Image (cartoon, rainbow, N blue to C red):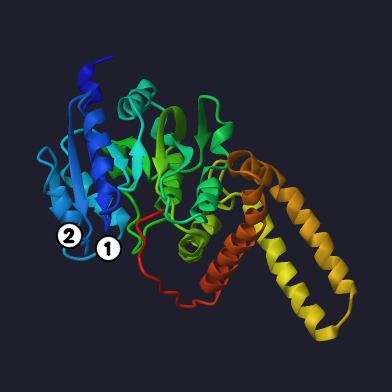
Amino acid sequence: MDTNECKVSVIIPVHNSEKTISYCLKKIISESNKLESEIIVVDDASTDNTLNILKEFKDIKIISLERNKGAGNARNTGANIAKYNNLCFVDSDIYISEDSIINLVKRLIKDDDVGSVSGSQNTINLNKDSWSSNFVCLKSCYGIDKINHEKILSTCCSEFCVISKELFLKVGKWKAFSNAGGEEFDLGYKIKKLEKKNIKTKEAKYSGYWCDLNTRFKRIIQRTEKYIPLLLKKKSFDSKGTFATFSQSLSSLITLIMVLNIFLILVFKNYIYFYVLLILYLLQLIIELKFLLFAKNKFGFKMLLYSLYGIQVINLAIIIGFLSYIFKLPFNSRKFESK
């Protein structure tokens, strides 16, 4: 393999990342030294100590944006000045594993029909401040554990992926949403339209700093609002190993019908609605059974019980996001960097 083909520009969008950026960068610098590379960090108008921490690192390029416009815009800003054709995007709240960058680049240039190659997340939660973030970690990692070596997915993992700059510009870059999240579905779809593959590989791994369930609830509302227009365009859900699957939407639909049944029980005092509610819940348990077993195997019986609650929280967020899109309801929340 020609070593010139392995040159890479590593692009890291950051916003209020003082808790994670230092160790994140140390891992990236260590890995990027294994091939000819540059590291571009785009500070998306951080208001904490992130920028001062970045200035402690000498071998990186820092771009400071005056206004916060979201991770997609920050990634595009870094890509615009990248000097190498291989672009590697890494989020500021993940820790990449050994040989991960070079393995992503090698896989990208191996076949002409590959559009993007993404790393696989470990079922490891770096956030030790919130126990509920373990559930968020599980929900985000579910399905990836079934990949033996690599798998073709419908999305391009925005957290850690590589793509050629030529293709990146051809598909129109990341969609610049105002808040983080949702860009991976759009870019993955545009890559597939050009008959290129989005691959997730086990040869490159990373661990994430996952947010608490309350934060995830707000983010899922926003992501659902962004996803529905793309869903209507594609007319299909995304593949297993992503969040926007058919089974996830079906579980959310059951939660919606269950909520309506609870309302009918309270209004009409008719126990037939209670039996309908029970049947619906059992059906939902069947749909979610594999995830529940996955949760129990990773974090024990306590997590299994908590997951029964967490599933409903996530489903309610999807329902609210759907209704917000349909009725054009405004939903404003602070921007979160953690996943």
Image disc number at residue 300 = none
Nearer the observer, 100 or 318: 100
Where is residue 173 drawn, in percent x and y? 31, 48
Check whether the beta carbons of the residues at disc 2 and disc 1 lie within 8 A of each other. Answer: yes
Q: Residues within 10 Å of mark 1 (few under 14, many from 20)?
A: some
Does residue 246 appear anywhere in the picture?
A: no
The residue at 63%/44% (across/down) is 300
Image disc number at residue 69 = 1
How many numbered circles are shown?
2
Residue found at the far left of this picture: 58
Nearer the observer, 29 or 174: 29
Element marked by disc 1 = loop
The residue at 28%/44% (across/down) is 169
**In the depicted structure, whether residue 38 falls above or below residue 138:** above
The answer for how far apart the CA atoms under marks 2 and 1 are is: 9 Å
**In the depicted structure, whether residue 39 falls above or below residue 262:** above
Q: Quadrant of residue 249?
A: bottom right
Element marked by disc 2 = loop
Nearer the observer, 174 or 28: 28
Left or right of 254 in this view: 54? left
Where is residue 103 drawn, in percent x and y? 35, 25
Left or right of 10 in this view: 331? right
Nearer the observer, 61 or 175: 61
Under mark 2, the amino acid is: Leu
Q: Which residue is mark 2?
A: 65
Under mark 1, the amino acid is: Lys
